Image (cartoon, rainbow, N blue to C red):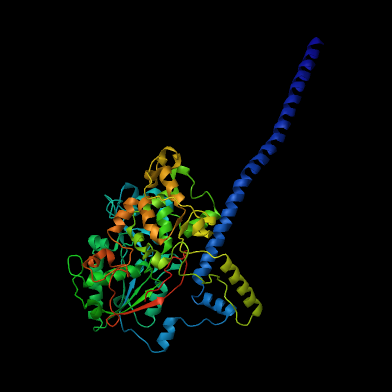
Amino acid sequence: MSTLRRRKGSETDKNSEEIPKEIEGNEKEKEKPNKKTEEKNRWSCVSNCCWFIGCICSIWWFLLFLHNAMPASFPQYVTEAITGPLPDPPGVKLHKEGLSVKHPVVFVPGIVTGGLELWEGHQCADGLFRKRLWGGSFGEVYKRPLCWVEHMSLNNETGLDPSGIRVRPVTGLVAADYFAPGYFVWAVLIANLARIGYEEKTMYMAAYDWRISFQNTEVRDQALSRIKSNIELMVATNGGKKAVVIPHSMGVLYFLHFMKWVEAPTPMGGGGGQNWCAKHIKAVMNIAGPFLGVPKAVAGLFSAEAKDVAVARAIAPGVLDFDLFGLQTLEHIMRMTRTWDSTLSMIPKGGDTIWGGLDWSPEEGYDCSPKKQKNNDTHVSANNETEHVDSQSNKVNYGRMISFGKDVAEAHSSTIERVDFRDAVKGNNLAHSNVSCRNVWTEYHEMGTIGIKAVTDYKVYTAGSLLDLLQFVAPKTMQRGSAHFSYGIADDLDDPEYEHYKYWSNPLETKLIPQPRVEVEAAVCKVEHFQSMETRLCLF
């Protein structure tokens, strides 16, 4: 019996051991779906992201397919359905009028609008041979910004190529047809001329490196000689018909320099003789030429903060001064642009005689209001008159190009206390007080805090004192500039002094080509103020 009992006991023991095992098994089975749900929850975020990216890519490819599949005239059809029939482009109108090719055309681009490509560079620019550093997509600005700044800068002593770097202008019509994708410069004009029969042999883009001084484009690239030979070739191959030249912006000054260079004797000039322009140029159509300079150039040289940068700073304050990874944006821009001698050609010329002084300017009485008055709206007319009276009472003197403080800009000159900065001693190097600028040297480091305070204590600067200001702030830059450009008014144009090439781009200090020999016209003549990129006075 005891044996049986023991067996029963052993069986019960076994059963009791099996029961917890079954419980543990059930608990494990219950835990398994929980792990599965956790895994599902864990991968749901990744799955959603993948689905989201997939949907965006699918929509993008679908839209791209529709864009390529639709007829080229579809956007025009939609536009005409909304706004009505579009007027014919100028080229179509001229073609309907029976006009065709006659005179060859030469385009002269302005500053920053011509493409520049790399021919030789440092190790950081591997793979960029003959790729655009300026113009196009500007992809290298984002990929390798410091390398891009290094290759776009020039030698601060000579104004030419740094050692081991060669950046050259793009050639052909593609050099300045588009500045960037969707931002045309000459493309529309080229397309309209093509409608009446113009082609590559009757159109020429006088591309040049817009960073260096005008005379140095001949010294380094023989750019002026190339323009001369191309114009001669176009005239010879088009039945002796003279060329029509269309310069834009700084290209107006560049071509003015060319016309003086081509007739000047060698070695300073091209040796073409006094009648070269009369034999080869029919007319010069200047578009927005800064003959007397632009105050915006001063802001760019002074602080690398022209109107565009100021607007960006107002929208996103602090971004341009952000020191992440040592990329001090404005310091790099300043260091780079101060090596571009071409910007010095657009410093205002003529001093206070042309631009005005502390208490007067040529714009006195001019209404700068952008609102257009409608003749049939008496209410708007009355409002405009009251606004004009208010603007007269709060008159701003545009002769004051730089003012440290809005109150100083509006105050009468008799109430402004000024301390002359010209004899100030520079010192207290900024590198010791500003850690963020140590890696980016600029000429402000040599000025020091004492020099900067002296500049601000002068308070107001006119065109007459701007040259002294820039000489104080950027001495190396102005030393190069004074060797290539002039900014005064000639006392006697017959003086042999004015035969030097530094005067050729200043219409106030050089003899212009007589109009009976070459027709000179202003295609666009704007009267703008200091915020403008172009000139406010038209010479021709």
Q: Residue 276: horizontal and vertical position, in percent?
A: 22, 77
Residue 246 figure quarter: bottom left
Q: Specify the quadrant that holds the N terminus.
A: top right
Residue 474 can be seen, yes or no: yes
Residue at 31 percent of width and 53 percent of height? 154
Q: Residue 532: horizontal and vertical position, in percent?
A: 46, 66
In this rendering, position of residue 37 left or right of residue 237: right
Q: Specify the quadrant that holds the C terminus.
A: bottom left
Residue 11 figure quarter: top right
Q: Residue 90: horizontal and vertical position, in percent?
A: 44, 81
Q: Residue 136: horizontal and vertical position, in percent?
A: 40, 62
Number of labels in the image equals: 0
Residue 16 figure quarter: top right
The image shows residue 306, relative to residue 508, as above or below, that is above
For the residue pair 176 and 23, the one nearer the viewer reads as 176
Residue at 42 percent of width and 66 percent of height? 355
